[in-house]
Image: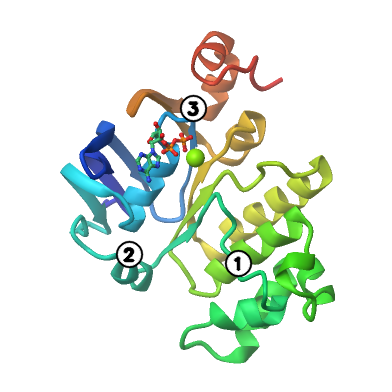
Amino acid sequence: MTDLLHIDHLTAGYGSIQVLHGVNLSLASGGRLALIGRNGVGKTTLLKAVMGLADVKAGEVRLDGQDITTWSARERAHAGIGYVPQTRDIFPSLTVEENLLAGLKDRPRSALDEAYALFPRLAERRQNGGQQLSGGEQQMLSVARTLLGKPRLLLLDEPLEGLAPIICIELMRAFEHLALNTGVAVLLVEQKVDDALRFAPRAVVLERGEVVHESESVALSQRKDLLERYVGVAGAH
Ligand SMILES: Nc1ncnc2c1ncn2[C@@H]1O[C@H](COP(=O)(O)OP(=O)(O)O)[C@@H](O)[C@H]1O
Ligand SMILES: [Mg+2]
């Protein structure tokens, strides 16, 4: 079977700076994969390379078997890749509802109900401005806006970063619900390793732009030595 996402010997970065060196990675349709590693190892760059926002020097990115390596970000979004950047991509001067409307593209306005069903907090705050939202609500809005494009592949870049534990639980539940009910495949970059390994059955560890470990998450969560070395935490309990 063809993987939904297949990354083959990818070398990429920014201009003359190479960040990723020969990365291989695959994700099946409807699958979940955790991508972990320390700050600065290239996790965001990998997601950007999948989205068409980094410079590829060598290798390939395939979506459903099709080589999309030279496609623009817009073309990739149209083909079903949704990217939620680490920076929480919302318009602070617009309301929640206006932010969502901006993500609608050619879908009917009633599609907003999907976003509100997934994140009831956003429904309560639909008339609030983006800058009045808490960090968690901004993240929910950023995710919800991307989902309105009905992606087949969702790229999440540290969605839990800086959020209170209770909000992290709410977000992880929403991702779980999404994966189960919409069949979207999820590539999750997350420094909260316990959450990442619980969510995804497989995990890839990145170190200095290279994949240094790939295994089932259950197996990795027992490897305190690897988690200590590559992520700097004692790991899942
Ligand atoms: N726009 C950019 N231009 C040049 N170098 C960058 C840019 N963005 C990130 N880098 C560098 O690429 C490396 C990997 O960064 P990044 O992919 O953001 O890592 P991570 O997400 O794992 O923390 C770092 O050394 C960082 O300084
Ligand atoms: Mg990053």
Q: Is residue 23 visible?
A: no
Question: Looking at the picture, does residue 230 appear above or below residue 8?
Answer: above
- State how the image is colored: rainbow
Secondary structure found at label 3: loop
Circle number at residue 37: 3
Residue for badge 2: 73
Q: Position of residue 194 (x, y in %)?
A: 66, 30
- Give the Cα distance between marks 1 and 3: 26 Å
Nearest the eye: 181 or 96: 96
Say if disc 1 is inside 8 Å of ligand 2: no
**Residue type highlighted by circle 3:** Gly
Nearest the eye: 115 or 16: 16
**Residue type highlighted by circle 1:** Ile
Say if disc 3 is inside 8 Å of ligand 1: yes
- Determine which quarter of the picture holds residue 215: top left
**Residue type highlighted by circle 2:** Ala
- Determine which quarter of the picture holds residue 197: top right
Which mark is nearer the camera, 2 or 1?
Answer: 1
Circle number at residue 90: 1
Say if disc 2 is inside 8 Å of ligand 1: no
Secondary structure found at label 2: helix
